[in-house]
Amino acid sequence: MPEPRKRLLEADVEDACCRYARRKGIWVRKFLSPNNRAEPDRLHIVPPLGWAFFIEYKRPGLAAKFPADAHEREQHRKHEKIRKAGNVVYVVDDIAAGKAIMDLYLELRDIVLKFVLTGVPNDTEQDRK
């Protein structure tokens, strides 16, 4: 008889996404702010451009319900303050979605670096032929 599939927890999603980010060269830091509750779980920084974004990790299926309780409403208010300050906060409950966010930043980074180093935009007339 096959073993029942393990139900993923928030920590499983967070760990898988953070391991992936580190393998791809993204800096990942646990975001702790003393005396401040409801901060996003992780700060991600994309070198060498220094692009930063926050991710609040949730158990699979819970991002669509966010904010569902008093603590999550407090988290949501904190996320909105961070966004109003010009930063990005994602709420991720799926490993594939978390990896896709990382991949998007890395793809954009590569396009910018290519342009900065060569002066040639990524989509040139030659590329379209």
Image (cartoon, rainbow, N blue to C red):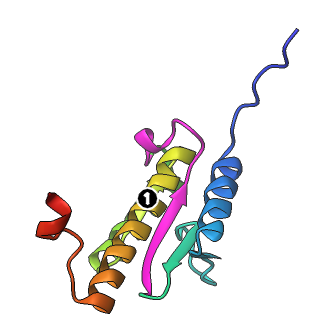
Write the residue at 57% across / 47% down: 95
Q: Is residue 7 positioned above or below 80 on the image?
A: above
Residue 30 in view (yes/no): no
Q: Position of residue 106 (x, y in %)?
A: 44, 69
Write the residue at 22% across / 89% down: 119
From the viewer's perspective, tell me whether residue 82 is left or right of residue 46: left
From the viewer's perspective, tell me whether residue 96 is left or right of residue 16: left
Q: Residues within 10 Å of mark 1 (few under 14, many from 20)?
A: some
Write the residue at 35% across / 84% down: 113
Dividing the picture into quadrants, the one containing residue 104 is bottom left
Q: Of residues 32 and 12, which is closer to you in this image?
A: 12
Q: Name the outermost residue toward the right.
A: 1
From the viewer's perspective, tell me whether residue 36 is left or right of residue 123: right
Q: Name the outermost residue toward the top.
A: 1
Q: Position of residue 23 (x, y in %)?
A: 65, 67
Q: Is residue 40 positioned above or below 34 on the image?
A: above
Quadrant assignment for the N terminus: top right
Q: Is residue 37 positioned above or below 94 on the image?
A: below
Q: Of residues 25 and 114, which is closer to you in this image?
A: 114
Write the residue at 59% across / 66% down: 21
Dividing the picture into quadrants, the one containing residue 51 is bottom left
Instruction: Residue type at mark 1: give it.
Output: Ile
Start-end of magenta stretch = 50-67
Residue 118 in view (yes/no): yes
Kindly identify which residue carries mark 1. 101
